[in-house]
Amino acid sequence: MIESAQTKDKIRRACKHIFLIIMSFIMIVPFAWMILTALKTNQEAISVNPFYIFPHNGWHWENFGTVWKSYNFIILYKNTLLMIFFRVLCAVLTATMAGYAFGRLKFRGKRILFALVLIQMMVPGQIFVIPQFLMVSKLGMLNTTFGLVFPGLVTAFGTYLLKIGYEGLPKELEEAASIDGCNVFQRFLRILMPLTKSSMVSLGIFTAVFAFKDLMWPMIVCTNADTTTLSAGLAKMQGQYGSDYPAMMAAATLAVLPMVVIYVIFQKQFVEGIATSGGKL
């Protein structure tokens, strides 16, 4: 009986590993296809032969050089990383303060204000595009880094996430700090905020990924090539009557590199943040 149970357990584990390996290959296929297409000619890229996977006429590495010279990727990298940095900074800063206020403080109109935050989460973000554009335009901040960061100055999702994080902390911590003479700001900065590090990391991860993938807002607010981001720059490569798919895939490969580097550096924080929040990218 024991050997039978151990055999079943081994078979179950083997099936799980095989399933995970297959799913891993499925996830890798789009990235592999992108890189292989970047190394083909345009005629090879648009071939309808499903088995035409590898380049038949040599590896065309010059596609990367052509794209790099045609589109100033240094500027695109700089604009994108600046947008991600300031959006993460502003989102974490404002959300942790608002989350503390909604989660730990008592004040008049608290429920109504938090209901407005929840309503904002339920409304499609596209509704706010026109008011936000008019505000940025009136401020004279079109084609600037501030214009790219503006929609991420505050975040309803981050406020909700941090509120839940603060509510999960024991009340005894705050009471003990009050007995020791800490005021509201000291309790927030020295006691409670450090304990919500996992929630702040989660918010930073989600904000960075969403900012990197943001396409519509950069195309609206930044029309100059020197102020746009990677996502908007790639979208502008799509031709009206035809497209150079190897060049587009080469540009997409170059665009993915910053997030790959960030993930390799902060891999531990990515996994912990996603596991803590229970979210999905």
Image: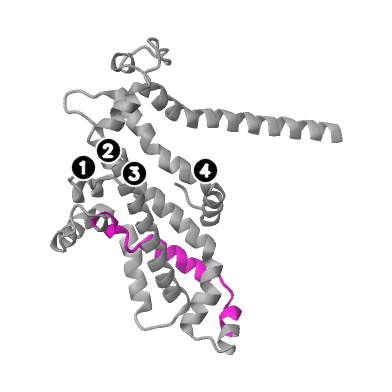
Q: In the rendered image, which residue does mark 4 sit on?
A: 264
The residue at 36%/24% (across/down) is: 38
The quarter of the displayed image where residue 118 is located: bottom left
Mark 1–mark 2 CB contact (< 8 Å): yes
In what element is the residue under mark 2? loop
Depth check, front residue: 207 or 190? 190
Query: Which mark sits nearer the N-terminus, 4 or 2?
Result: 2
* Cα–Cα span, label 1 and label 2: 9 Å
Mark 4–mark 2 CB contact (< 8 Å): no
* Amino acid identity at mark 1: Ala
Q: In the rendered image, which residue does mark 2 sit on?
A: 72
Query: Which mark sits nearer the N-terminus, 1 or 2?
Result: 2
* Amino acid identity at mark 4: Val
Number of other residues with Cα within 10 Å of mark 3, as a class: few under 14, some 14 to 19, many 20 or more: some
- The image position of residue 163, as x and y in percent, is 46, 68
In what element is the residue under mark 4? helix
Q: How is the image coloured?
A: one colour
User: In the picture shown, does residue 135 fall above or below 148?
Assistant: below
Q: In the rendered image, which residue does mark 3 sit on?
A: 77
